[in-house]
Amino acid sequence: MRFVRFQVNGDAPRVGWLHEDMVGEIQGDLFGSFRRKKVSVPFKDARLLAPIVPSKILCVGRNYVEHAKELGNQVPQVPLIFMKPPSSILADGGTILLPPQSSQVEHEAELVAVIGKRTRNVTAEDAKSHIFGYTIGNDITARDLQKADGQWTRAKGFDTFCPLGPWIDTDFDPSDAVITCRVNGQMRQMVSTRDMVFNIGTLIAYISSVMTLEPGDLVFTGTPAGVNTLKDGDEVVAEIEGLGMLKNSVKAEGA
């Protein structure tokens, strides 16, 4: 099933579910007890928001061998984790703003796991039962600032640097799906999720040994090789086979 957050005519955000070309509202707690109301809103009339507002966004660096190599890095022995602030989230269709502090802002298309229940010290085998579903993310990165700072908070944390969506899919199989990223229609990234260095269960087990994950928290699972610079006027499309497509425009901030 696919779940969304949406607005109609500028009203308050609502949580909904998709059926063909219609949206129905969810009543109750998406991660607890809820009821699906009758589909009543044409999908074309719904303005999609980011599908979740998490307490935390956990990301994993260098989780595909070729991506580590293209940036001149070693593949880590254990998952390399970092965080993005929730304020960086951007919905499908939103505009990525290129900040004046950077001249090298790059795309990083990724599969994102959405945590479904409180998770602490789980095993890799048990992690699957703690996942609510999956969505698509783009870990936008100011590469020059990442190199200059020696740590990643500023480079990863600008407003609009976390495109997310368009929905959460609870039936998606993450074991062998192709991730692609196109900029202005040109292919930049393409890989299968089976090529992850650390699989999703291992990632969640590792992260949960450090901190408690809450329902709705996000785990970005790493990006494939092919990252490249975004420019004013670009359109970037991250797509995952069987999951959907995340489209965003790009604009220089203040332009």
Image (cartoon, grey):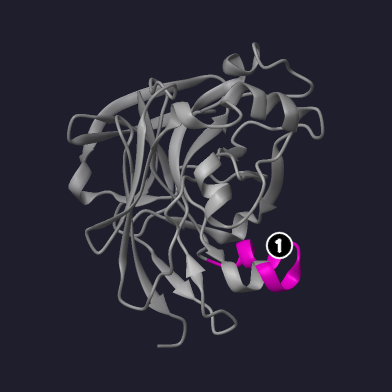
**Vertical side of 40 occupied by 90: above or below:** below
Packing grade of label 1 (10 A; few <14, some 14-19, many >=20) is some
The stretch of residues the image draws in magenta is 147-159
Q: Residue lying furthest right in this view?
A: 210
Q: Residue 120 sits in which quadrant? A: top right
The residue at 48%/30% (across/down) is: 195
Residue that carries the numbered disc 1 in the rendered image: 153
Task: Pinpoint residue 5: horizontal percent, then vertical percent.
Answer: 41, 43
The residue at 54%/33% (across/down) is: 114
Front-most of residues 137 and 18? 137
Task: Pinpoint residue 147: horizontal percent, then vertical percent.
Answer: 67, 68
Q: Which image quarter holds the N terminus?
A: top left
How many labels sit on residues?
1
- Secondary element under disc 1, as helix, strand or loop, is helix
Magenta stretch contains residue 230: no
Task: Pinpoint residue 67: horizontal percent, then vertical percent.
Answer: 52, 48
Task: Pinpoint residue 203: horizontal percent, then vertical percent.
Answer: 65, 29
**Vertical side of 102 occupied by 149: above or below:** above
Magenta stretch contains residue 151: yes
* Three-letter code for the amino acid on which mark 1 is drawn: Thr
The residue at 29%/29% (across/down) is: 242
Q: Main secondary structure of the magenta part?
A: helix
